[in-house]
Amino acid sequence: MSQDSSAPPLRLWPGLVIIALQWFIRYGIVHINTEWTQFAVLGGLLGGVLLAVWWVFFSRASKLERFIAVPLLILMMIATRPVLDPSVATGMMGLMFFIFSIPLTCLLFVLYVSVARNAPPKMRLAGMVATFLVSCGVWTMVRTDGIDGSARSDFSWRWQATAEQQMMAEMQNATQQTADLTTAEAAEWPGFRGPEGRSSVPGSKLATDWTAAPPKQRWRQPIGPGWSSFAVSGDYFFTQEQREEEEVVACYRLADGEQVWHHGDKTRFWESNAGAGPRSTPTLAGEFVYSQGATGRLNKLAARDGALIWSRDIAVDSGVEPPGWGFSASPLVREDMVITAAAGTVVAYNPADGSKLWQSEKDGNGYHSPQWVHLDGVPQILTLNGYGVVAVSPSNGETLWRFELPGLGIIQPMVLSENELLVSGGSSQPMFRIKVTRDNSGWQVTTVWESRGLKPYFNDIVRHGDHVYGFDGHIMSAINLNDGKRAWKGGRYGHGQCLLLPDQDLLLVLSEKGELALVSATPARFQEVARVPAITGKTWNHPVLIGNLVLVRNAEEAAVYELAQTSGKAAEADPF
């Protein structure tokens, strides 16, 4: 059926141009530069606005078609919200529903109008309604497990079993056992980022030709969701995960991955960006393991069998509500104190009975774990929050000094000397080298330099010699500590994590896609030495290396790989 001869033909070319630009900006430019993620999201929404302007004022459609389209779409999207999967409809993803659906709706709309351009206005109007129904209806059939570091969502059909549900089916027959732990010696990897929290493994002697001697999978199995890393002692490792309505601390055998014991608390944390589960890593201290959950449960457990010694609720104790991303600090056990953070507020407990000793002033939200340092000869506890870096006294929690930072307070500070730190707020903000000194007037903090050569998002950094290595967005980068200038940038690993192997001038990288890679930790140039797939799914968790065994996990599965070793003698460890 042909169009009414009295009506002018539709002007389609502006709509086609807008769609092409909208999709390029929304989904193309992040592959050029991940720092343009926010611009990409805004570009997708702006494309919808421009398309509406074209349709209402310049398309030559009938008056009814032009002025009913936008209100009709808005009403349909509002009506769709109640029947969406909760992972798509609530929290940040409630906003992401509009961010993801608008480009698709615009594309389907322009494609339909292109096909039906010669149809009568009433028929086009009916087709418009059908197009909007399809574009909204698609979203009722999917769920999301959150977004990755570049704001790309992980969609799946909502009727498919989740990785957590599949894991729970396999765990039905698990039994409680005891761990034959030797507690006289310190744990090889006591908690988050290893000994002294530096993500450094001196003494490694790994073979680097993974073509001739690839990593050998010792075991690989499902695990509950969560962003915890590992604590390791002997043949046992400890981690945290979500199992339906229980937040779990679990002990596994390193040799075969078999669960030894688990302790569960009846609580579940979920948010739409990162999904379900705890965000912290348990800490081993002597014969005990300390854990903090995303809703604020702080536990002291017997490392041997998971028996509960005491438990506290840091949200209640501190008067701080969990932020949108949950409580994320890993406990710090030091000098007769268990120290943790309720977002940006530091809280200290007596390890013997869990009684509260003190808390710092409430100072905004953060994702950071408390860190024990000595600056200018004075012990202090560092934390990051929405303000920046804050140092408090271990004796009473009083603030010693503060340094304002842009960002959300994610990246662990790096101690460079007795009075210098390297700090960043994360969220792709610059690095700052600061100097902290004390005189008769009190503490003084000055900036030595600021660098945009390395802008980590939520990915911690490592130091080797006079250079620092880490993720600049989703690309590895190295900067010179003397002036902050970039030495090199290269290699796309998503928003992953890395360990330093100082004796071999290497970085062991775990990519956001679950790949293991070796990257040269030298300032001359970027060089990838090896790369292999390890686990599947979005991977933000810090890896651990014990001898030649590398432990990796994400929110879906965990694995241990055995790396071939060289017979040569390792070089002397880097003093830093």
Image (spheres, grey):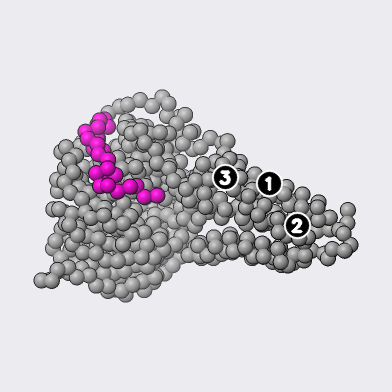
Q: What residue appears at the point 17 percent right and 49 percent down from the top-left corner?
A: 358
Q: What residue appears at the point 55 percent right and 41 percent down from the top-left corner?
A: 85
Q: Amino acid at mark 2?
A: Leu
Give the mark nearer the N terminus: 3 vs 1: 3
Badge 3 is on which residue?
81
At numbered mark 1, what does the secondary structure look like: helix, strand or loop? helix
Q: Amino acid at mark 1?
A: Leu
Badge 2 is on which residue?
64
Segment tinted magenta in the rendering: 299-325
Give the mark nearer the N terminus: 1 vs 2: 2
Q: Amino acid at mark 3?
A: Arg
At numbered mark 2, what does the secondary structure look like: helix, strand or loop? helix
Task: Indicate the quadrant where residue 235 lies.
Answer: top left
At numbered mark 3, what does the secondary structure look like: helix, strand or loop? helix
Q: Residue furthest left?
A: 440
- Callout 1 crowding tier (Cα within 10 Å): few <14, some 14–19, many ≥20: some
Q: Residue 497 at x, y = what percent?
A: 39, 54
